[in-house]
Structures are given as C-alpha cells and as structure tokens.
Amino acid sequence: MFVETITAPEDEWHSWMARLRMLTDPPDALVSTIAWHSGDGTITCVNVWDTPDAVGDFYMERVRTVIEADGEPANKPERRGEPAAVYVRQES
C-alpha cells in the first residue's frame, strides 16, 4: 500500500475530486479515500493506493489532462509512503 494526504479549501477539494472522478469512477488501484472537514474551511483527505506505481499511473491517466487544461492545483498531495501498520475491520 501507499498513502498520500492532501489539505485544500473545500471548494477546491470538491472541484478536483469531481474532475478526477475519485468517487464516481474510482481508479481500480485506489484502496480507500477518507476525507473530513478540518474546521477552518478546508478538507483533509487520505488516499490509500495499491502501490506507488499506481499513483503514477493515475497521474498519467487522469491528473495530467486536468492540469494541461486548467493548470497546476494550488494544493498538491503529499506522498507519505508505505504505512508502518494497517488495521481494517472485516465485516462477517
């Protein structure tokens, strides 16, 4: 797994999530995405990917075209790397 985080103003976060289709057509390599209101008009999000290469593929397939059309985002994801520990509750 590979983890990245991003904090952005709420309107910017919603705009990028919609343009990248993160929730409506999630990339196969996206394990999970969790976002919350940070309390200061921003949203913080954690994305968990299968591998670091999956993030690169996602960039080439979706992000690059948005950047070419609209320019670089003001707030970029921070790559955190591989998690040191993971727990996911299993539903039975």
Image: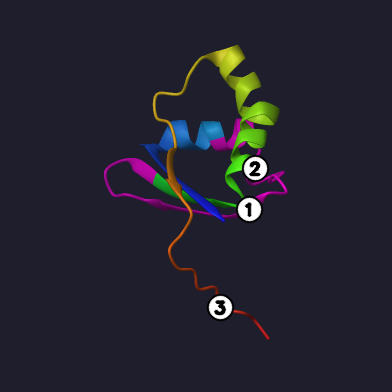
Q: CA distance from mark 2 to mark 1?
A: 6 Å
Instruction: Determine which residue is flagged by label 2.
Output: 54
Report the quarter where the N terminus lies: bottom right
- The local crowd at label 1, few if under 14, some if 14 to 19, many if 20 or more residues have their Cα within 10 Å, is some
Residue 10: quarter of image: top left
The outermost residue toward the left is 40
- Along the horizontal axis of the image, is 84 left or right of 21? left
- Specify start and end residues of the magenta stretch as a single range: 17-43
Report the quarter where the C terminus lies: bottom right
Disc assigned to residue 50 = 1
Q: CA distance from mark 3 to mark 2?
A: 24 Å
| Place of residue 44 in the rendered image (x, y in percent of width and height, measured from the top left) | 39, 47
The outermost residue toward the bottom is 92
Q: Residue at x 54, y 73 (%)?
A: 88
What amino acid type should be assigned to the residue bearing mark 3? Arg
Image label count: 3
Instruction: Determine which residue is flagged by label 3.
Output: 89
Q: Earlier in the sequence, mark 3 or mark 2?
A: 2
In this view, the residue in front, 46 or 40, is 46
